[in-house]
Amino acid sequence: MNDTKLTASELVSAYATGELSPVEATQNALRVIEERDGETNAYCLVDADGALEQAKASEIRWRDGNPIGWLDGVPASIKDMFLTQGWPTLRGSRCIDPDQPWDVDSPVTARLRENGLVLLGKTTTPELAWKGVTDNTLTGITRNPHDPSTTAGGSSGGSAAAVAAGMGELSVGTDGGGSIRIPASFCGIVGLKPTHGRIPLFPASPFGPLSHAGPMARSVDDTALLLDVLAMPDYRDPAALAPPVSTFREAVRRDVRGLNAAYSSTLGYVDVDPEVAAIVKSAVQALGDAGLHIEETDPGFGDPKAAFDILWSTGAAKWLDTFPAGSETKVDPGLRKVWELGKTFSASDYLGANAERAALGILMGEFHTRHDVLITPTLPIAAFEAGHEVPPGSGLSGWPDWTPFTYPFNMTQQPAISVPAGRTSGGLPVGLQIVGPRHSDDLVLAVAKLLEEVRPWP
């Protein structure tokens, strides 16, 4: 059985029947890493021996009828932003000393271990996860498995590329401005940014209220299963939410036909590539044909990029100010510009941007009293040439200029998911974004599941 084509749910079913073992699945994932990662550069660390040890322990549990979780034995990766005991967490930076004790697991890592997932290694990130593509001077350029000449997106580009290429069924990324949904769209996988605090973070992110962690997978069911694993409180995150009252693996089956969905093709101010727009519109029509009530309307806010830039750059500056002397000569030149920009803002500027963020959240809260979900393109473009922060020749100044559908919903802290909607004529994936009210992660997953059913992704 070629398990690299199976979802995590299918793998676990095969474990239960004895048709496949966690060791075989892990060996296959490691084989694909060996075959494909030289081209995609999705991993910055692979621990084959450790993964096989974990897989053998899982195999024994399955043989004895005592799996310790719904995803026991499933090969997975974790973005190199999460502390992981025994492995360095360099965050894509040459300024972080790898020669130090690495004896703490982040909440995300701890939950994966507790539920028996097999950790294959750590995936690449731009330095400090600062931008919407994945490259850095430490590990190089991460490329899209669908076309290695194009970017995988970012900042969780390594995770998206790994999942899309079959180098592990699951991964966990971070999202402070679209960093899960951007690469999910470019690489043709499912990526969920849950409600802020749904997945605990430690250490606290310097990007504060913008920051989320989330599951990345090849199916909506797998995304829900992984969220069940990750959505448990941790005392180290004072903003963590209470445990869910029901499981996401069950909620994903909710019948959403008859609900009211707003479809905004541009948010009222975004220029969208015509081919991308046509693909997303066709997928929205399929949702309408399946019974979702679709109304074309914009949520009614202007581009909040100026406030986002303040929140983002001041967070980066605060973090980088803690780095060793001389780091300004080592960091990504683009990140250095963000660092310098962040230093120009005052506390009053930050509080003003945070007030704008709160006002945007209130506006969207009112919007969702009339519309159960909001549907948009995930991105206005398909993947572009790798090694560039913006599409070459576009005249854009930075990554937020081509991610206008994602960062507003970090500011509002709402759940938002990217699901594959189709491919361009050149074979590049296009994502559709579903946004729900705060705390409606279950609803967002259920609508995503409906799209997956009416527009199956090969």
Image (cartoon, helix red, strand yellow):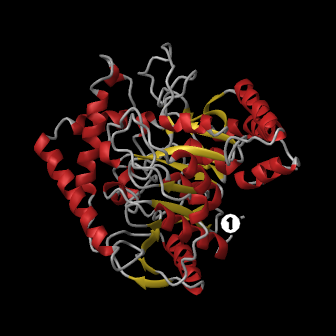
Say which of 136 and 50 sits in front.
50
Find residue 75 and report its image quarter. Answer: top right
Say which of 69 and 379 sits in front.
69
x, y percentage for residue 204? Answer: 36, 35
SS at circle 1: loop
x, y percentage for residue 109? Answer: 55, 35
Identify the residue at horizontal 64%, vertical 60% (top origin).
221
**Neighbours of disc 1 within 10 Å: few (<14), some (14-19), many (20+):** some
Determine if residue 383 is in view.
no
x, y percentage for residue 424? Answer: 61, 67
Q: Which residue is mark 1?
A: 457
Amino acid at pointer 1 = Trp
Identify the residue at horizontal 65%, vertical 76% (top origin).
454
Q: Would you say 323 lies left or right of 425 here?
A: left
Determine if residue 149 is in view.
yes
Q: Quadrant of the C terminus?
A: bottom right
